[in-house]
Amino acid sequence: MAGSHDAPLQQLESSLARELGRVVVGAETSIRALVIALVARGHVLVQGVPGLGKTLLAKTLARSLGGEFKRIQGTPDLMPSDIIGVHVFDESQRGFVFRPGPLFADVVLVDEINRAGPKTQSALLEAMEERQVSAERHVFPLPPDFLVLATQNPREFEGTYPLPESQLDRFMLRIDVNYPEREAETEILTRYGGMLTAAGTVMDGVGVLERSLLERARAAAERIHVADALMAYVLDLARASREHLRLSLGLSTRGALALVKAARITAGLRGGDFVTPDDVKAASVWVMAHRLVVTPEAALEGSTDIEIVRKLLAETPVPR
């Protein structure tokens, strides 16, 4: 039985779908994942080959949230100070002042994050986990709804550094973007094929979501009940992943917590008052796949993280 308090979550999803749909074609599955991340204050990793509109998705999201958008391009020579900011000597103040880097925005797109070196990737860790940045012994808070959307090319691409497990674990969800269906691709060509003007004008129609809607959606998600049996089911999935022969690393405690949060929001999005095993299953590929490390032998045989998550779901008994 749907409760009266579930409306803000569904309203948030339909409003976001409407605004993103003005610019982005065929992003329905991505929109649900983005709503889950927004409500849970989680960060999102978007994986896919170049040219599938990942940047456009991030830009449109920032626009619809009414926040400031900054883009960071991952390159091997990108330094931590390039993203955090630097202290510069100011003549008028006779001292050093902090010039914030692009990390100080509401929505930060880190494009091709796996092209940045390990040192720069680790500079993102503190920002993502603690929503603050340390520079020269000073701590600077980031915006309250700070959201990192990072894109990465699939691993086979040349010149990429695999993200460390600790970094991957900081992303609440991973969305895998594939080539669009033919109908969607036709629409993209029809809609944008004749545009020879600057790409910036496509954003003009995107409206800003009502500010209180996100807060109301968060409050609604908090009221959704999670039974003990459901918590046990999430822990069973986590344990099964840790003991799986084809995995060298299973789901962390942070990952299990992210799965519970995502399942609660998923329940609210379908109008439920409590979480069911189906809500856990619906969110599990987004939350689990990128946190699992497939053994080299299994990878050689063609096993993928998504395939293993589906096997874990099929093999783990569901609570009654």
Image: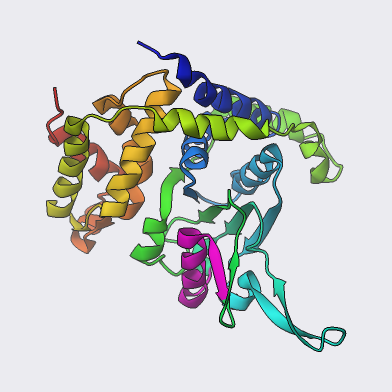
Left or right: where 25 falls relative to 203: left
Residue 252: in magenta span: no
**Residue 94, percent from left and from top:** 81, 89
Magenta stretch, overall SS: helix
User: To which quarter of the image does residue 65 belong?
Assistant: top right
**Residue located 32% across and 41% down the image:** 259
User: To which quarter of the image does residue 83 belong?
Assistant: bottom right
**Residue 12, percent from left and from top:** 57, 27
Q: Which residue is nearer to you in this view: 280 or 186?
A: 280
**Residue 200, percent from left and from top:** 80, 45
**Residue located 53% across and 54% down the image:** 151
From what the image shows, is residue 289 above or below residue 91? above
> Which of the image's four quarters has the N terminus?
top left
Left or right: where 219 falls relative to 291: right
From what the image shows, is residue 239 above or below residue 70? above
Residue 248 visible to an observer of this rendering: yes
**Residue located 21% across and 60% down the image:** 295
Left or right: where 33 falls relative to 298: right
The total number of labels drawn is 0
**Residue located 59% across and 83% down the image:** 136
Q: Which residues are magenta?
A: 116-134
Left or right: where 284 falls relative to 33: left
Residue 27 visible to an observer of this rendering: no
